[in-house]
Image (cartoon, rainbow, N blue to C red):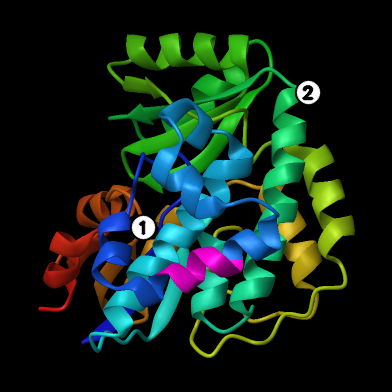
Amino acid sequence: MTTIALFSGQGSQYEKMGLDLVKQDAELESIYEAASEALGFDLFAIVADADAQTLGRTIYAQPAIMATSLVCLEAAKKRGFTYDAVAGHSLGEYAAMVAAGMLSLEDGFKVIKARSEAMDAAAAAADGAMCAVLKLAPAEVERICAETEGYVVPANYNSAVQTVIAGDRAAVEKAAEACAAQKGRTVMLAVASAFHTKFMQPAADAFYEAVRDVKFAAPKVPFYSNVLGGVRTDFSDMPKALAEHIVSPVRFTDELAAMQAAGITRYIEFGPKNVLTGLVKKTLKGVTAKNCENCETLEGVLE
């Protein structure tokens, strides 16, 4: 059975996520210590004590989700879990890079600090929004976006019946209304702006300048890319590739198809909530999909 480790994206955060794993195994707190050293603030305290609104800020949410994902993975590895490939959804690609050996733990948090700060600044400068559209085919969502006045585009291709749209808030709301009129179900997302759109170009530029000298190793296992919708084989300029990632759609549906074609049959998601697990179950047949976010779910992925 071929196993892939998947890593959660932004918006899945919640208060005190994953802390029961740290309480059970104090050695896991070293991940938060490395994060806090790189970030310049106490990340453990943010996860343990911050309210939902504070935790939802991009500068906190991104490193907090990444730390939680890596705590979950390390807890599973200490119990014998192994994996043959990695992938992440948006932010999750950074935990995936650490898991694949492309970045050290310390460099992983230095890079996510640069990303979260750049995206937080870009979000504050633009009134962007994101909305999940369910029960409509991606082509129909694309058509509606194209016909809507203002700037709104598909940003995340999550499944055959779930596409996230993003752009100017007013245009997103208009497109969401049009999708609802076609029997689609719409859910506004708890994010700070229109991620994976041109609204994030200032963030991409600032991020690139901040990380252009960071050294990335080739992955020890196949690394699936949101931008490519398949396995990335060119690692010659990862700062440029990751800057492009900030403004490009997440082609997760294509990634899942490529994973299945490669013979992957077991999909284990590490991090808060089980969003990716749900997408796998809705998209692929005949595979195993489980999530690990706490002590209870840890036992399930080890079976």
Q: Main secondary structure of the magenta part?
A: helix
Q: Return the residue at label 2.
A: 125
Q: Residues within 10 Å of mark 2 (few under 14, many from 20)?
A: few
Q: Return the residue at label 1.
A: 271
Q: Residues within 10 Å of mark 1 (few under 14, many from 20)?
A: many
- The answer to whether 64 appears left or right of 15 in the picture is right
Q: CA distance from mark 1 to mark 2?
A: 29 Å
Q: Is residue 142 above or below residue 115?
A: above
Residue 1, position as x, y percentages in the image: 21, 87
What is the count of numbered marks? 2
Q: Amino acid at mark 2?
A: Ala
Depth check: 92 or 185 in front?
92
Q: Quadrant of residue 38?
A: bottom right
Residue 182, position as x, y percentages in the image: 33, 15
Query: What residue do we see at 78% from left, 42% from top?
Result: 203
Residue 43, position as x, y percentages in the image: 54, 52
Magenta range is 29-34
- The answer to whether 271 appears left or right of 151 in the picture is left
